[in-house]
Amino acid sequence: MTVTGSPLLAVRDLTVRYGAVPALRDVTFEVPPNSALAVLGPNGAGKSTLARALSGLVPAAAGSFALDGRDLTGQPPDAIRRAGLVHLPEGRGVFPTLTVLENLRMATAGDRRGRPAALERAFEIFPVLRERRRQAAGTLSGGEQQMLSLARALTADPRLVIADELSLGLAPKMVDVVFESLRRARSAGVAVVMIEQFASRALDFADHCLVLRRGSVAWAGAAGLAGPELLRRYLGEATAA
Ligand code: ATP
């Protein structure tokens, strides 16, 4: 894909292996600042592996990735997170018995001085969470729990969020809540790498699209150019919807 200006995230020839089996092969792409990239591909294509590699959860066997020109290859997850690259994994990542406010306070435990501003920022982006701040997180709807998970991540003031299947298993209305939450994150200046089962919704949301197949980049380009035929070719009927 053609990208002007310096990229926020630059991934070069990234290769990941589980034992001898390659799950990602020579994957190269860029994410410009404050943009959204949809990562699509059939089951087993390597999408989650890409997310795990970029968050330091699995090592790169070869290649590199850099955020804002700073090489993060081989860094531990904590350092990558502190550098501004946050991974929101599948599953909600909230503490169900704690209130919304307690969940957000825990996310800011490392920065007590910055906490009030970080909490205020989260509530400004997600007013629903302010209304529900005294409610146990486990009693929120699925979409709202994802919103809380995203709000927790945003308290660290990230540059880029990797949203890995946030709408998995959610009812359609809750999927709307998740997309709206990510839209708000973007408006707040955060770039998004979205791994998403709802390909057409992800493409509506994203500027760019990367299609993975068997661990390699099968197609990359502007999201608006990834039409139904391309989706059918790479993803099959079921996932193209
Ligand atoms: P899905 O859409 O089904 O979640 P995916 O595109 O996210 O798939 P990955 O989960 O990244 O794909 O898996 C890529 C390949 O790596 C698959 O062949 C998978 O079986 C393999 N794989 C994933 N995790 C491991 C692991 N921990 N050990 C060994 N192989 C793995």
Image: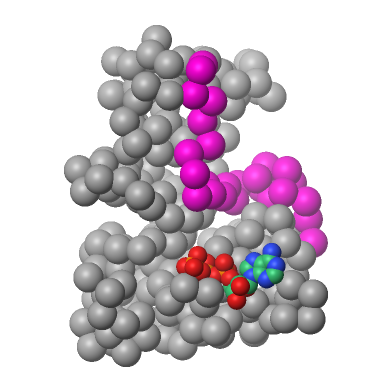
Q: Does the magenta stretch include residue 47?
A: no
Q: Is residue 19 left or right of residue 202?
A: right
- Which image quadrant is residue 219 in? bottom left
Please determine whether, in this image, residue 231 is positioned above or below residue 241: below
Q: Give the tally of numbered discs.
A: 0
Quadrant that contains the C terminus: bottom left
State the image coordinates of residue 22 (x, y, percent, origin top left).
69, 81
Q: Regarding ligand 1, which quadrant of the image does it lie in? A: bottom right
Q: Give the range drawn in magenta.
A: 74-98
State the image coordinates of residue 90 (x, y, percent, origin top left).
50, 50
State the image coordinates of residue 178 (x, y, percent, origin top left).
32, 44
Q: Does the magenta stretch include residue 95?
A: yes
Q: In this view, does 238 lie to the left or right of 113?
A: left
- Which image quadrant is residue 203 in? bottom left
Q: Can residue 173 be seen in this view?
A: yes
State the image coordinates of residue 221 (x, y, percent, origin top left).
37, 81
